[in-house]
């Protein structure tokens, strides 16, 4: 006869009598169905799980050994895995231009036993170098192309000859890609011709949209070894593929932006490039069918600011990163100063998204500009945009959030659709509420813009 110390023990024994029956096994757990004697079943389940946990490393080792035997050696297996993480011959990669900023100098002490425990203090400063790139596989003959053409045909009433346009083909190409996820690439800062020294950074895996990002810290000592000096304005970066036999090079640059100075944050569409943003059909035609055309006088104005004031440029736009190559070529052709690009990543899924491709969302633009301003607390900022969409409201918000940081706001006057006044007093009173009136101004012609002396 069984005796029980408590009523709880009696109930547990009465309800937990079953025999364990294994009905399935996962990678770390054994699933058991209990028919009688639950107490015994619990013990058996626990012991079987202990065995499974103990066996897991052995099974992983066995799997690795099988892979090694198939590939010849552990080194060859690892090389094969790493090679798959690099840019294949049917893939492409882009390194976008970025902005680097100084990190403060710090001192550290080292002790040497070579000279009776002598000590030395070293002071170092350097640069925080952001890395941003995109890796993808072109799919020009895919069903996606036909679907995208169908969207454009509906939206723009395309003619046959327009569908065959080389410009359209060129502009669509970056949208017709498979973004490569999980690629682990290595980026290096390249030295000048006088040295082979490099600074490398192993990146984390690329994201679902094919983009990868990282941070690399380069000390002043390393810059000296790379062959750069205090007058250098940018560094050259490239993707490294040690496991690939490909000779292709993917080159990018980062701008060394000093803690103090003038930064120009500029919109693109209808500010420096004619786009007709207020008319969606015209905007789409300018984006996909026409060669990009500059706003007259803006390139000369920006070049003058660079020469006279040492200005750095940051192009913040709702244009997608798929248009980066075309925009970069346009900037180079029209002789705009080099700068960083702050665009958006999109995936074309439906006609509505296509029509809103270049839509200018308020919060997103405020966030992007705010990130730049807050990263350089000692720089002076000049904001340039247009009255077509949300630039007045965005720039007014920036002035309020970062008082004293914005020197001037210049807005190019753009006519509204169907006679809408984009420069009404009511609009600007609200957009620049609580902002000094002499900070912002509107212009029709770039030649009207004169920059007063920089604040001390």
Image (spheres, helix red, strand yellow):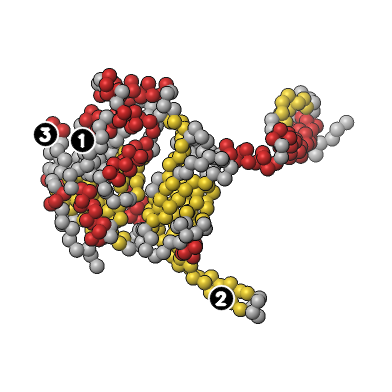
Q: Are marks 2 and 3 in contact (CB under 8 Å)?
A: no
Residue 99 lies, in percent from the top left, at 38, 53
| As drawn, 211 above or below 100 | above
**Residue indicated by mark 1:** 276
**Which mark is on residue 120?**
2
For marks 2 and 3, give the CA distance: 72 Å
Residue under the point 56% across and 72% down: 109
Horizontal side of 24 relative to 409 (left or right) equals right
**Of callouts 1 and 3, the N-terminal one:** 1
Residue under the point 40% across and 45% down: 96
Residue 43 lies, in percent from the top left, at 79, 35
Looking at the rendering, in which quadrant would you find the C terminus? bottom left
Using the rendered view, name the quadrant where residue 378 is placed.
bottom left
Residue 225 lies, in percent from the top left, at 49, 63
Horizontal side of 286 relative to 194 (left or right) equals left
- Which secondary structure, mark 1? loop
- Which secondary structure, mark 3? helix
Looking at the rendering, in which quadrant would you find the N terminus? top right
Q: Is residue 342 visible?
A: yes
Q: Nearer the viewer, mark 2 or mark 3?
A: 2
């Amino acid at each position: 006869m069984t005796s029980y110390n408590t009523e709880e023990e009696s109930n547990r024994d009465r309800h937990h009598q079953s025999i364990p029956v294994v009905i399935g096994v996962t990678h770390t757990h054994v699933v058991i169905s209990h028919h009688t004697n639950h107490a015994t079943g619990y013990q058996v389940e626990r012991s079987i799980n202990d065995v499974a946990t103990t066996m897991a490393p052995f099974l992983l080792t066995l799997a690795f050994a099988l892979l090694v035997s198939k590939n010849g050696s552990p080194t060859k297996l690892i090389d094969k895995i790493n090679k798959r993480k690099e840019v294949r011959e049917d893939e492409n990669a882009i390194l976008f231009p970025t902005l680097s900023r100084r990190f403060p100098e710090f001192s550290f002490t080292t002790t040497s036993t070579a000279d009776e425990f002598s000590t030395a203090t070293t002071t170092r400063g350097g640069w925080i170098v952001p890395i941003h790139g995109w890796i993808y596989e072109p799919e020009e003959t895919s069903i996606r192309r036909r679907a995208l053409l169908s969207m454009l045909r509906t939206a723009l009433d395309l003619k046959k000859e327009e569908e065959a346009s080389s410009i359209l083909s060129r502009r669509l190409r970056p949208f017709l890609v498979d973004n490569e996820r999980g690629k682990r690439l290595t980026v290096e800062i390249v030295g000048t011709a006088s040295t082979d020294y490099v600074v490398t950074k192993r990146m984390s895996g690329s994201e679902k949209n094919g983009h990868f990002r990282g941070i690399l810290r380069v000390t002043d000592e390393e810059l000296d070894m790379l062959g750069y000096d205090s007058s250098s304005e940018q560094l050259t970066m490239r993707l490294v593929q040690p496991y690939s036999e490909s000779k292709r090079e993917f080159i990018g640059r980062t701008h060394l932006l000093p803690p103090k100075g003038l930064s120009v944050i500029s919109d693109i569409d209808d500010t420096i490039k004619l786009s007709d943003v207020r008319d969606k059909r015209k905007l789409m035609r300018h984006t996909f069918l026409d060669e990009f055309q500059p706003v007259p006088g803006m390139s000369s104005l920006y070049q003058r600011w660079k020469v006279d004031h040492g200005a750095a440029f940051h192009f913040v736009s709702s244009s997608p990163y798929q248009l980066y190559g075309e925009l970069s070529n346009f900037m180079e052709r029209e002789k705009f100063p080099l700068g960083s690009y702050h665009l958006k990543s999109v995936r074309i899924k439906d006609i509505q998204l296509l029509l809103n491709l270049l839509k200018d969302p308020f919060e997103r633009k405020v966030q992007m500009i705010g990130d730049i301003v807050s990263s350089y607390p000692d720089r002076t900022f000049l904001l340039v945009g247009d009255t077509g969409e949300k630039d007045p409201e965005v720039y007014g918000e920036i002035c309020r959030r970062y008082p004293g940081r914005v020197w001037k706001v210049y807005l190019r006057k753009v006519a509204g659709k169907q006679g809408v006044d984009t420069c009404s007093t009511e609009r600007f009173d609200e957009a620049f509420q609580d902002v000094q009136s002499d900070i912002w101004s509107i212009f029709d012609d770039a030649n009207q813009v004169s920059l007063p002396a920089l604040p001390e």
